[in-house]
Image (spheres, helix red, strand yellow):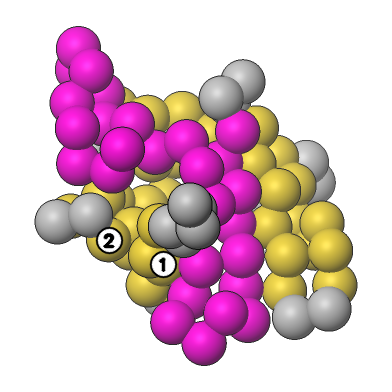
Amino acid sequence: MAGTVEGDHVDVVGMWVTADGHIRQELLPDGRYDEARGERRSAYTGRYTVTGSHLDYVDDTGFTATGDLRDGVLYHEHLVLYREQKSS
C-alpha cells in the first residue's frame, strides 16, 4: 500500500495513473516498470529502484528519470500519478 514503509523503502508496487488516465505506469515487484501512454502500450519499459521514498528509473534505452512518493502521490519528473485502486 502506498505510504507504508517496509524497512528503508516505501511500497510502490502497483499501477499508477495520471488524473486523466492517459499515462499508466505499472511498477512491478521485480524492479521493472511498464508505462503506457494513451493507446500505446509499453511505450516505456525499464527498471526502477527505491531508496526511502525516492525512485530512480532507467529505461531500456538508457534514459534516466527520478520520482518521489509524497502523501501517497507519485511525482515522476513532470507527471503526477495516483495509485490505481482495485475494484472489489
Tell me if residue 49 comes above or below residue 45 in the rendering. Answer: above
Magenta residues, as a range?
Answer: 1-28
In the image, residue 31 lies in the stretch drawn in magenta? no
**Residue 87, image x and y in percent?**
50, 57
Identified by mark 1, the residue type is: Leu
The residue lying at 63 percent from left, 81 percent from top is 22
Tell me if residue 38 comes above or below residue 35 in the rendering. Answer: below
In the image, residue 18 lies in the stretch drawn in magenta? yes
Q: Between residues 48 and 74, which one lies in front from this camera angle? A: 74
**Residue 44, image x and y in percent?**
75, 56
Say if residue 38 shows up in the picture. Answer: yes
Q: Which residue is mark 2?
A: 73
Q: Between residues 3 and 9, which one lies in front from this camera angle? A: 3
Give the side of residue 37 with respect to residue 25, left or right: right
Residue 81 - label = 1
Tell me if residue 62 comes above or below residue 17 in the rendering. Answer: above
Number of residues whose C-alpha sits closer than 10 Å to that of mark 1, classed few (under 14), some (14–19) or many (20 or more): many
Q: Residue furthest left?
A: 71
Alpha carbon separation for disc pair 2 and 1: 6 Å
Residue 10 image-quadrant placement: top left
**Residue 49, image x and y in percent?**
46, 28
Q: Earlier in the sequence, mark 2 or mark 1?
A: 2
Identified by mark 2, the residue type is: Val
The residue lying at 51 percent from left, 67 percent from top is 17
Q: Which quadrant holds the N terminus?
A: top left
The residue lying at 18 percent from left, 26 percent from top is 5
The answer to whether the residues at label 2 and label 1 have Cβ atoms under 8 Å apart is yes
